[in-house]
Image: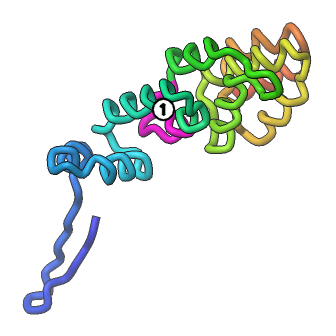
Amino acid sequence: GVLGVTARKGQLLSVCINESTLVPYLKSVNQAGLAIQLASRLNLPGAEDMYVEQFNQLFGSGDIMGAARLAAESPMGVLRTKETIARFQQLPVVQGQSPPMLQYFKILLEKGKLNSMESVELARIVLQQNRQQMIEGWLKEDKLECSEELGDMVVQYDAKLALSVYLRANCP
């Protein structure tokens, strides 16, 4: 919001934007690009359908990195779902490139912290490769959301690391 003082009477004015209606308004006046930018930058509601449509378009055209970036930047995590992970899992691995799932998680990790579901899915991949040290590093960087499910998975490979996960998740 913005605060201001009137020149004549010295009154204090407060002007605020209604966050829940800003993006829908911009869409209604054909400012879709600005609506997406603001929704992404300020984590505003109202652009969910536009994000899903743009994600489907990028994914369908084969722009996997673009789709992953869009999912990572989607407001309120609208594209950070099991369905999105499943779509990346279904993609074939191209010879000489890292799997699309790992590319997706790499972008998410660059943007910030993974949610609980993403943390479990990434841990599943990494633990199958017997690379617990990666999980340990992400925990130190606070990139994973710890949960009992994640701890249950990690305990099969490294009890000490699992204890750290349980403690961070406040599991009894």
Compared across the picture, whether 16 is left or right of 95 comes to left
Percent x, y of residue 49: 31, 30
Amino acid carrying mark 1 in the image: Leu
Q: Is residue 73 magenta?
A: yes
- Residue at 61% over, 36% down: 65
From this view, report whether residue 153 is shown above or below residue 136: above
Indicate the quadrant where residue 106 lies. Answer: top right
**Residue 166 seen in the figure:** no
Q: 47 or 100, which lies in front? A: 100
What segment carries the magenta color? 69-80
- Residue at 42% over, 46% down: 40
Q: 162 or 125, which lies in front? A: 125
Percent x, y of residue 24: 21, 42
Element type at mark 1 = helix
**Mark 1 = which residue?**
58
Indicate the quadrant where residue 11 lies. Answer: bottom left
Visual colour scheme: rainbow
**Of helix, strand and loop, which mostly describes the magenta segment?**
helix
Q: Is residue 30 magenta?
A: no
